[in-house]
Image (tube, rainbow, N blue to C red):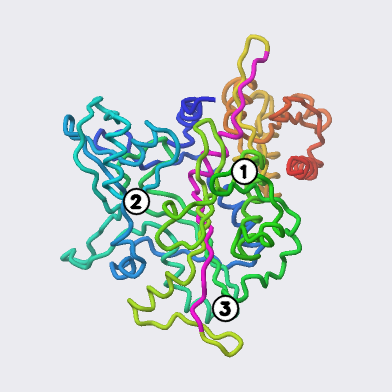
């Protein structure tokens, strides 16, 4: 299923589209989400919140998007948050050097590779400029992707739009540790935007300049990495691990710990919870993998990294960086701020270690669409619909009067208002033929349809239509809430 079909559907139903698209001067890499798209996106975050944040007893914050320069001096971003770029001498266009080589040679090229090595690879593989076809490039150089802002009337107070959401969490840790239970492990979560000055944004939501992130930072005592209270719940659960130089294979959490494939039970536990979350998004385990990163690929702060990836029509896409960041961040902030970041446990003082689950909201949104996209022939007609899981479908049902006259619209409004009061996500639509209304809703992934017709006036029943099977059945209006709850539960099995 080509990417173009997803993009066409997104534009047709206003799921997402370029920001400020009416202006030719609008920068690429920024997107708006329309009413249906924002509803799905909000539910993607909601499922993460329900399945991970709330179930695991995490604390959730909402941090500022602009932070002082000192934060990023402490984190190492001012020095290390760089992408390798190269400029074509013929047309002066700029490109990510690692991406150019990867596309030409195939495989993965670490962005941390030395610039001289990238120069050699560009020459070796006779890389061409994607814009003009030229082969003459300047030397590869490093480009810092931070977006700076000036604060105050003079604009001289240096600050940056955050390139990742986690720095707010690290800065907040002392206060949250003290104000909560003062006990480790302590998991702190946040969903919000980060900003990266990408050289060449592409593939719509997969490489943006404003990035949606839903992030978790787990602070723990490194000497108690195997003291995980609920580990028994996942010990036999199998992770799809792709070790360095090997193909993916299913490995139980207990086996991963025993064979030291991961640093400890805490790592295996949260990898399991992550994989289970994406199963809830409707992704088959066979299309997921945790790819182990080698020394050249890992971020500068990571001791151990697993990239959680999902297979799509565009290939394997990274959705989550699972990083064991050790005490790198808290040490850096203690050094720069001179604020104590250590804690006491069992009479010993230490700086906690951190394991991170940094997930892309918009990438997850895109992958859920990709996984749910269906196209099928129905006689001479072609049907396109999104088979979205019930928990991320934009609506539980559409409410449709067969016609607007003869009191059917008034009856439909009562059904609509009644279901709203019962806490269902429903919408009302009386425009166009009933077939077109079904088609519009199916394309947007609406879970079901409820039609109020002339029989409703006689026996107070409605027609319920299932999105996936297109089968219809009569349901009493009084039984609709119970019927919809049951349909939603069955879809989650």
Label 2 element class: loop
The answer to whether 459 is drawn above or below residue 198 in the figure is: above
Image-based side of 134 in relation to 464, left or right: left
Residue located beneath label 2 in the image: 196
> From the image, which quarter does the C terminus lie in?
top right
Image point (69%, 62%), residue name: 258
Q: CA distance from mark 2 to mark 1?
A: 31 Å
The answer to whether 483 is drawn above or below residue 303 in the figure is: above
Dot placed on the residue nearer the N-terminal end, 2 or 1: 2
Q: CA distance from mark 3 to mark 1?
A: 40 Å
Residue located beneath label 3 in the image: 180
Image point (36%, 52%), residue name: 195
Dot placed on the residue nearer the N-terminal end, 2 or 3: 3
Residue 185 figure quarter: bottom right
Looking at the rendering, the stretch of residues picked out in magenta corresponds to 350-378
Image-based side of 43 in relation to 229, left or right: left
Q: Position of residue 487 (x, y in %)?
A: 77, 40
Residue located beneath label 1 in the image: 248
Q: Nearer the viewer, residue 475 or 470?
A: 470
Q: Nearer the viewer, mark 3 or mark 1?
A: 1
Q: Nearer the viewer, residue 247 or 314?
A: 247
The residue at the far top in this view is 380
């Amino acid at each position: 299923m080509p990417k173009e079909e997803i993009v066409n559907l997104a534009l047709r139903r206003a799921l997402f589209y370029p920001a400020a698209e009416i202006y030719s001067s609008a920068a690429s890499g920024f997107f708006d989400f329309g009413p249906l798209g924002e509803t799905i996106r909000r539910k993607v975050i909601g499922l993460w919140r329900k399945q991970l944040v709330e179930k695991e007893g995490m604390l959730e914050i909402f941090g500022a998007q602009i932070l002082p320069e000192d934060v990023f001096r402490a984190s190492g971003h001012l020095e290390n948050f760089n992408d390798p770029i190269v400029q074509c001498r013929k047309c002066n266009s700029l490109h990510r050097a690692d991406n150019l080589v990867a596309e030409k040679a195939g495989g993965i090229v670490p962005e941390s590779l030395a610039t001289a090595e990238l120069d050699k690879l560009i020459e070796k593989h006779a890389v061409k400029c994607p814009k003009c076809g030229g082969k003459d490039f300047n030397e590869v150089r490093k480009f810092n992707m931070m977006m700076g802002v000036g604060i105050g009337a003079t604009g001289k107070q240096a600050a940056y739009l955050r390139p990742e959401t986690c720095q707010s969490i690290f800065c907040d840790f002392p206060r949250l540790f003290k104000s909560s239970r003062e006990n480790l492990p302590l998991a702190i979560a946040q969903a919000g935007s980060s900003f990266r000055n990408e050289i060449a944004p592409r593939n719509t939501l997969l490489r943006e300049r404003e990035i949606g992130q839903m992030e978790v930072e787990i602070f723990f005592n490194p000497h108690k990495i195997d003291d995980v209270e609920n580990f028994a719940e996942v010990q036999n659960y199998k992770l799809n691990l792709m070790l360095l130089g090997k193909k993916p294979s299913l490995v139980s959490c207990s086996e991963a710990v025993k064979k030291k494939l991961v640093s400890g039970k805490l790592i295996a536990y949260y990898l399991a919870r992550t994989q289970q979350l994406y199963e809830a998004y409707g992704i088959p385990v066979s299309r997921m993998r945790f790819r182990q990163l080698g020394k050249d690929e890992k971020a500068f702060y990571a001791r151990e990294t697993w990239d959680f990836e999902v297979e799509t029509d565009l290939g394997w896409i990274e959705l989550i960086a699972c990083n064991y960041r050790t005490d790198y961040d808290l040490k850096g902030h203690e050094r720069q701020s001179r604020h104590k970041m250590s804690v006491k446990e069992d009479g010993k003082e230490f700086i906690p270690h951190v394991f991170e689950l940094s997930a892309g909201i918009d990438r997850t949104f895109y992958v859920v669409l990709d996984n749910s996209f269906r196209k099928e022939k129905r006689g001479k007609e072609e049907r396109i619909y999104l088979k979205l899981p019930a928990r991320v479908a934009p609506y539980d049902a559409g409410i449709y009067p067969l016609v607007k006259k003869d009191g059917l619209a008034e009856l439909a409004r009562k059904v609509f208002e009644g279901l709203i009061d019962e806490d269902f996500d429903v919408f009302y639509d009386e425009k166009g033929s009933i077939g077109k209304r079904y088609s519009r809703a199916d394309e947007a992934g609406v879970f079901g349809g409820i039609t109020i017709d002339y029989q409703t006036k006689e026996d107070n029943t409605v027609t319920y239509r299932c999105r996936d099977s297109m089968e219809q059945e009569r349901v009493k209006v009084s039984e609709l809430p119970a019927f919809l709850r049951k349909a939603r539960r069955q879809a989650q099995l």
